[in-house]
Amino acid sequence: MKILVTGGLGFIGSHTVVELQNKGFEVVIVDNLSNASEKVIDGIIAITGKKPLFENFDLRDKPKVEDFFSRHNDIEGVIHFAASKAVGESVEKPLLYYENNLGVLTYILQELSKKGSANFIFSSSCTVYGQADKMPITEDAPVKSAESPYGNTKQVGEEIIQDTCKVTPHISAIALRYFNPFGAHPSVEIGELPSGVPQNLVPFITQTGIGLREQLSVFGDDYPTADGTCIRDYIHVVDLAKAHVAALQRLVNDENEENYEVFNLGTGTGSSVLEVIKSFERVSGKKLNYKIVRRRAGDVIEAYADTTKANAVLGWRAESTLDEAMKSAWDWEQKIRS
Ligand code: UD1
């Protein structure tokens, strides 16, 4: 069965391609290499022994999208990762984010509308919940007003899919709301390749550990949490990738009850910034150079997932511990800097 993975050379995309190929799916990757390298394909081959098809083009080019789907009319599912994801940049360049994250989404859904049946999986984010009123966060927690254009693209993206599914019963879609993915494949053949200064916590920690950054700034220790630092749900990227395969299998086997469903993907456990630092120190045997600085604008105090729905309905749960995932992130950082 042929599956299109947009953004399949990116961080979460590449790990998902590996899990798809391991389960026997035939993968076609479309990626414009804006935030990824073609060398990732070598890593995928090293792990799976199979070379995915790859086409390098920009999905904002609508005629190319149309041409792609007419050439690959046997595609039975799409996992759509291709999107921009830097919160700060989205504030500076909102139209770029709306074009990349929403314009492209409408092009793909238009193509799927033309088909007899189609399965679609969307990368959403726990950012849609903002600061949720209750922990852990269930899927029916209200969606709060977005703090950034990036966050808004995830909310509006979900609405675009939901509206499309209402009038197009032959499209089945699942939106996956990721908590905080990190880590690398245990083979260390693929992992995260942040461009420039990492904005996310774990890549900043491992780059500080390896000596690429001098010091980690911990954004605030005066939050109303046990140690004063923010709490998030850090999930190993391999666990997250496996959830995509479970979601796809639900759709291709017609097990879905509604043609639009939403799932939280997290571990169900919250960890503070200081706990994440301690995990790094345990795993690496190094002391991390960090200092406490002012809070970062837009950070929520805590966000961790209630994963009951994904556990029960997808038959999936995150298996790696924080330390196991951290070890993979550290092994990867050491490998790419050696
Ligand atoms: C951020 C985005 C979220 C997006 C996700 C994508 C914000 C407010 N949220 O999530 O919308 O879906 O990235 O990966 O930007 N931290 C430090 N020092 C650092 C970096 C982070 O203390 O140098 C802290 C943050 O304050 C936060 C935690 O580490 O408490 C995690 O931060 P980060 O990795 O940026 O993820 P989120 O903010 O949860």
Image (cartoon, rainbow, N blue to C red):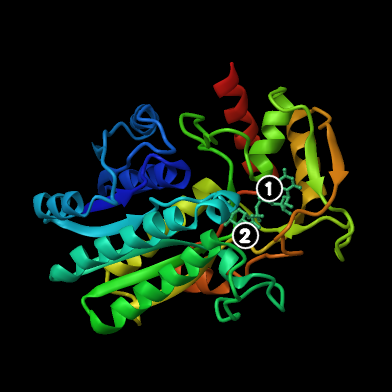
Task: Say which of 35 and 281 sits in front.
Answer: 35
Is 97 left, or right, of 253 in this rendering?
A: right
Is 92 located above or below residue 306 in the figure?
above
What residue is rendered at 50% in x and 73% in y? 312
231 is higher (above) or lower (below) than 42: below
Is 123 on the left-hand or right-hand side of 226?
left
Q: Mark 2 and mark 1 in contact (Cβ < 8 Å)? A: yes
For the C terminus, the quadrant is: top right
For mark 1, give the secondary structure. helix
Q: Residue at x 42, y 60 (%)?
A: 98
Residue 247 numbered tag: none
For the residue marked with disc 2, what is the amino acid? Thr
Image quadrant in which you'd find residue 313: bottom left
Per the rendering, the mark at residue 267 is 2
* Ligand 1 lies under 8 Å from the Cβ of mark 1: no
Q: Secondary structure at mark 2?
A: loop
